[in-house]
Amino acid sequence: MGSVGQPAAEEKHLLQLIQKQYQSIRSFSGRFIQSSHRADTETGPKKAEGLVSYKRPGKMRWLYEAPEEQLLVTNGQTMWLYDPLLENVTVQKLEKITEGTALSFLLGLGNLQADFIHREISKNLLIGKDGLIVELEPKKSTANLAFIQLNVHPETYNLQTIALMDQQDNYRTIQLMNMKYNLEIEDNFFEFTVTNDMEVIEAGN
């Protein structure tokens, strides 16, 4: 499974198909399950799940329902991470964190072929997943990202699961489920209002 042994032209074509399909989607909404695997622990992966929504270009909202409630939302310029338990919100400029990353692709701002190098599967992070699996190495090296793997539907090329591996061999997978595409979603769904009772943490500005 995956892209092992595929000719280079076919690999390039596959990336184009994934990119084209993703770019054709104006919006989506559905559920996600995130599994975080740490290399330095014997305990199993940490699970989190919730609701995800996306609107092209650059707007995304991840509402974590379990194990703790958290809200990560961006309007394309600013990203807010709100923790209702601690009543704090971390505010960050999106451009500081997106260039050449998996996030820039997910937000519809980046291009797989421009930002990544397609290579053979090095680790089975998405073992047992139906569909096509590709592994991509970022052209710009970062501490947080060694490579990503995308698992896409074999016929529609819709994104099903994404895996992100860091330089310390920790990785997480995000599975997208019950996706509904090209919905009408208001822009203000991707805004966050900071109120006086919240502690504001400015990150990386």
Image: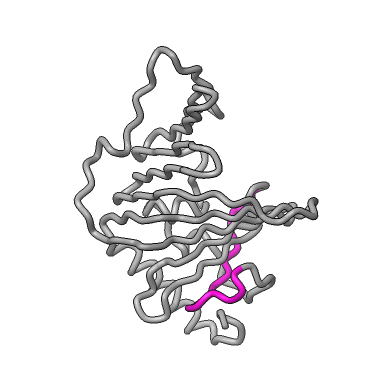
Q: Which residues are magenta?
A: 126-142
Q: Is residue 90 located in the magenta-colored stretch of the structure?
A: no
The residue positioned 64% from the left and 51% from the top of the image is 46
User: Relative to residue 103, is residue 136 depicted above or below?
Assistant: below
User: Relative to residue 167, is residue 4 depicted above or below?
Assistant: below
Residue 62 falls left or right of residue 156:
right
| Towards the viewer: 28 or 168 | 28
The residue positioned 51% from the left and 23% from the top of the image is 88
Report how many numbered discs are placed on residues in the image: 0
Asked which quadrant contains residue 26, the reply is bottom left
| Towards the viewer: 5 or 174 | 174
The residue positioned 53% from the left and 82% from the top of the image is 8
Q: Quadrant of the N terminus?
A: bottom right
Q: Residue furthest top?
A: 196
Residue 49: x %, y % from top left: 49, 50
Residue 169: x %, y % from top left: 73, 56
Q: Is residue 134 located in the magenta-colored stretch of the structure?
A: yes
Residue 32: x %, y % from top left: 45, 55
The residue positioned 37% from the left and 81% from the top of the image is 155
Asked which quadrant contains residue 188, the reply is top left
